Amino acid sequence: MPLSDHEQRLLDQIEQALYAEDPKFASAVRSARSRSRTRRSIVLCVLGVLVGLGLVLVGLVANVIVLSVVGFVLVVGACGWAAQSLRNHPAGSGEGMPQLGRASRQAGLRTRMEDRLRRRFDES
């Protein structure tokens, strides 16, 4: 049952007050919720791949091409969904660690590689 507009506004106000009062707790709750969503989507993706492979095999054995095609589409879709889920929520990202953008990560890698190269030339 969806919330009414008044109830939704009240819920938003309570949520904003929680963020203002205790931002650390609010971020911990938010990250725990996203981890459970990621876990659930990965489980669904694995299930989709298994069901799709089963459909492909049954379609090949029963010589029903349409069933095999549906199974293949299910496998590809589940793999794509898993990749998207993992891209949005990288594994091993800590709660307290800030998320770095792709450019800053690449810049950090580039800097480390340049430092290593300089040290090698300085040693010889």
Image (cartoon, rainbow, N blue to C red):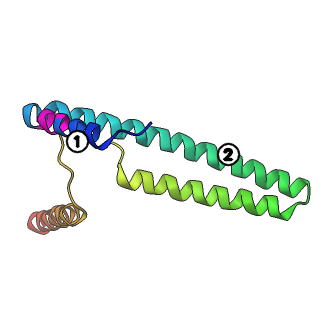
Q: Chief secondary structure of the magenta span?
A: helix
Q: What is the three-letter code of the residue carrying label 2?
A: Leu
Residue holding disc 2? 50
> Dot 1: what SS?
helix
Determine whether, in the image, residue 31 is placed left or right of residue 123.
right
Q: Is residue 77 depicted above or below 12 in this figure?
A: below
Mark 2 or 1, nearer chain start: 1
Q: What is the three-letter code of the residue carrying label 1?
A: Arg
Identify which residue is drawn at 59% across, 59% down.
77
Q: Is residue 19 depicted above or below 85 in this figure?
A: above
Give the quadrant of the N terminus: top left
* Pick the front one: 110 or 114: 110
Determine whether, in the image, residue 81 is placed left or right of residue 23.
right
Residue 98, how many percent across, how many down?
17, 47
Q: Is residue 16 within the magenta segment?
A: yes
* Pick the front one: 33 or 106: 33
Q: Is residue 20 depicted above or below 116 in this figure?
A: above
Identify which residue is drawn at 91% across, 60% down.
63
Give the Cα distance between marks 2 and 1: 42 Å
Q: Give the range drawn in magenta.
A: 14-19
Identify which residue is drawn at 25% across, 63% down.
102
> Residue 9, which numbered label?
1
- Number of residues whose C-alpha sits closer than 10 Å to that of mark 2, classed few (under 14), some (14–19) or many (20 or more): some
